[in-house]
Structure formats: structure tokens, C-alpha cells
Amino acid sequence: MSEPDEAVELVPYDDAWPELYDKERFRIALAFGVIPKSGLIQHIGSTAVPGLTSKPVIDLMLGSSKWPPPNALIRGVCALGYENLGDAGVPKRVYLRLRGPVNFNVHIVRRGGTHWTNNIALRDYLREYAAARETYAAAKVAALNIGRGRLLAYSEAKNSVIAELIAAARQRL
């Protein structure tokens, strides 16, 4: 298994990201015989929030009705070219990545579980509230500097701001 740490950069929001997500969602859904718009695959992370500075990596969340997810589900995503990085330090998540001309991450989590609800709540909150987007964008830039351009340190440096934003988002549910 590869190391999840990698170089990270931030770029301005790209209007192409929703369409790239949609194409990858369709490709994954077809591999499993799932209706693409069933809601089992969600666009999460900063690329799902128009106007937000982001890593140029499109995050998809795949909801599993069972935990741990069936091995066939993980193998199926890997068959599409994704690399399985296990939980990569986040319990109750399977993290897979695909690097190429367009970069993707797939996060397999329990559908309806804490990761599922937190990611959707955060995404929707950031979409709705400009002040929250600005707070998060500033935290991302600061985290990039603290993390010296490495993913794991960058992620760790912004954890407290994410926790605050998730708490605010969940109050609105």
C-alpha cells in the first residue's frame, strides 16, 4: 500500500469540476450497476463548492450500506484504476485515489453515518454561506504554508477550522 502523503497545491475554483465529477460518478455507477443519480455517490470537498479555492482533486463519497464495506466494492473501484490507501488515518473510511490528467479521490463511508452526514452538511453549508467559504479559504492557505505543501500536514493544520464549520453546519440540520 502506498503512502497517502503527497504534494498539495491550491488553485482557484474551476467551473469544469462539476462536469468532471459527473463523468466520474457515471463511470463508477456503471461499474456497479447503480443509477448515477441515486445519491449513493456524492461530490464533496472544496471542488463541490463554487468559488472556493481548492486542491485540484475531485472528491467523491461513495456510500456503503454495510460497514466495513464489502471487499467487492473496494476491488471494483480499484479495477477502475484507483489505488487503495486503506483508512489513511481516518477510521471508518476507505480512501482511494486516482492520479492522472484529472485527479480523483473516492471516500467509501457508511451511508447515513457520521462521515456521510458531516461531509454533506459541510458542503451544503459552504455553498450557502459566503462568510464560511471565506473562513475556510483563509484556513486552507494558512494550512498550506504550515504544511509546507504536503497533504498530511496540510490536512492536520486545517482540522480545527473544519470541526468548527461542521459544528455550525450541523446546527442548521
Image (tube, grey):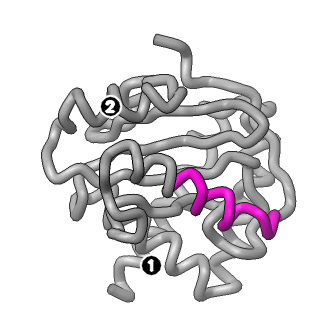
Nearer the observer: mark 2 or 1; the answer is 2
Specify the amino acid type for callout 1: Ala
Of residues 151 and 142, the one drawn nearer to the viewer in this rendering: 151
Where residue 137 sits in the image (x, y, percent)? Answer: 74, 64
Of residues 66 and 76, the one drawn nearer to the viewer in this rendering: 76
Local crowd size for mark 1, using a 10 Å CA cut-off: few (<14), some (14–19), many (≥20): some
Residue identifier under label 2: 74
| Quadrant of the drawing holding the C terminus | bottom left
Q: Mark 2 or 1 closer to N-term?
A: 2
Residue identifier under label 1: 168
Count of marks, rendered view: 2
Q: In whole angstroms, how far apart are the C-alphas of marks 2 and 1? A: 32 Å
- Helix, strand or loop at disc 1? helix
Main SS of residues in magenta? helix
- Residue 115 covered by magenta stretch: no
| Horizontal side of residue 52 vs 164, given as left or right | right
| Horizontal side of residue 73 vs 78, given as left or right | left
Where residue 138 sits in the image (x, y, percent)? Answer: 77, 63
Residue occupying the point 37% across, 25% down? 86
Compared with 140, 92 (above or below) is above
Where residue 140 sits in the image (x, y, percent)? Answer: 72, 54
Of residues 10 and 83, the one drawn nearer to the viewer in this rendering: 83
Q: Which residues are magenta?
A: 13-25
Specify the amino acid type for callout 2: Ile
